[in-house]
Image (tube, grey):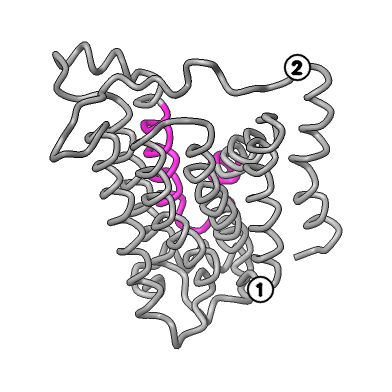
């Protein structure tokens, strides 16, 4: 990666977030922790929201299996995929802890793993665009400031850096996918759609709870959609081969269109 651009990307959420803070501070809504489904299921408080994290855990384990099978290879997507996979496993645990007792203090354990996932996906996006493997050192220097955005919220209550990391990263994914600058855009579109559905389910948590006559709520379904987003990552990494690690994006697109060479 170009070092100056890399450093600019790392600092953007903090610099822009600091500027936006003075114009419009972004704080946690007072009713954020109010979820529709609070039933006791199998002895678990808020059981549906806790147990539905098994879908996220399953996605993380499936992706870790992909990484394990390629542990001896130089697969170009390995660094980003491994980071995302670990993030999913940690997110399942962190989200379960949070939903057992939803407070600001427990929410940090939900958000920290999400920043690991965001960082890993950005690394995968870079590889998908350029065909180059992200060095482990640069991946680590990407994950650390990503986690810092959640810690800033936990310490100071300021959400702008975290929001800019999440939605700025999403904007980058959507922009490069629309312009077809990524390898295997169908996989990226699947990820985008699953993420969009997850956010809608989260937004309409109570409405879905009422519409289903108190059978299902939106937030537990959101966790299932997040698990589907994790599985979509397998479609993103499938066409890439280690021999393409130094290929141009144009060569990657040609390889992707060829069903024989793309495997």
In magenta segment, residue 183: yes
Pick whichever, 238 or 9, lies toward us.
Answer: 9
Q: Position of residue 199 (x, y in %)?
A: 42, 29
Magenta residue span: 174-199
**Looking at the image, residue 137 lies above or below residue 104:** below
| Element assignment for label 2 | loop
Relative to residue 227, is residue 116 drawn left or right?
Answer: right
Distance from the alpha carbon under mark 2 to that under mark 1: 37 Å
| Element assignment for label 1 | loop
**Looking at the image, residue 115 lies above or below residue 225:** below
Q: Position of residue 221 (x, y in %)?
A: 27, 33
For residue 24, the mark is: 2
Relative to residue 186, is residue 163 drawn left or right?
Answer: right
User: Which one is earlier in the sequence, the residue at label 2 or at label 1?
Assistant: 2
Pick whichever, 44 or 37, lies toward us.
Answer: 44
**Label 1: which residue?**
135
What residue appears at the point 83 percent right and 21 percent down from the top-left corner?
Answer: 22
Locate the N terminus and report the quarter of the image it occupies. Answer: bottom right
Classified by dominant secondary structure, the portion drawn in magenta counts as helix
Pick whichever, 175 or 166, lies toward us.
Answer: 166
Instruction: For the residues labelled 2 and 1, say whether their Cβ atoms are less than 8 Å apart.
Output: no
Locate the C terminus and report the quarter of the image it occupies. Answer: bottom left
Q: Callout 2: 10 Å neighbours few (<14), some, many (20+)?
A: few
Relative to residue 57, is residue 165 drawn left or right?
Answer: right
What residue appears at the point 13 percent right and 40 percent down from the top-left corner?
Answer: 42
């Amino acid at each position: 990666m170009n070092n100056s651009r890399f450093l600019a990307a790392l600092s953007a959420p903090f610099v822009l977030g600091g500027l936006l803070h003075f114009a419009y501070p972004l704080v946690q809504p007072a009713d954020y922790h109010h979820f529709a489904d609070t039933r006791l299921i199998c002895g678990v408080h808020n059981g549906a929201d806790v147990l539905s994290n098994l879908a996220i855990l399953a996605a993380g384990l499936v992706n870790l299996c992909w990484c394990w099978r390629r542990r001896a290879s130089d697969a170009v997507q390995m660094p980003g995929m491994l980071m995302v996979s670990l993030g999913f496993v940690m997110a399942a645990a962190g989200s379960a802890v949070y939903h057992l007792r939803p407070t600001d203090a427990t929410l940090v354990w939900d958000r920290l793993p999400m920043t690991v996932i965001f960082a890993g996906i950005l690394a995968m996006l870079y590889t998908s665009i350029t065909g180059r493997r992200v060095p482990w050192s640069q991946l680590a220097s990407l994950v650390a400031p990503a986690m810092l955005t959640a810690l800033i919220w936990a310490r100071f209550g300021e959400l702008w850096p975290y929001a800019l990391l999440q939605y700025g990263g999403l904007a980058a994914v959507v922009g490069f996918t629309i312009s077809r600058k990524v390898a295997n855009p169908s996989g990226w579109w699947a990820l985008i759609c699953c993420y969009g559905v997850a956010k809608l389910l989260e937004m309409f948590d109570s409405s879905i709870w009422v519409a289903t006559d108190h059978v299902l709520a939106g937030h537990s379904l959101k966790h299932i959609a997040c698990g589907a987003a994790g599985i979509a990552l397998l479609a993103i990494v499938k066409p890439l081969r280690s021999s393409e690690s130094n290929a141009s994006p144009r060569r990657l697109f040609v390889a992707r269109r060829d069903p024989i060479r793309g495997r």
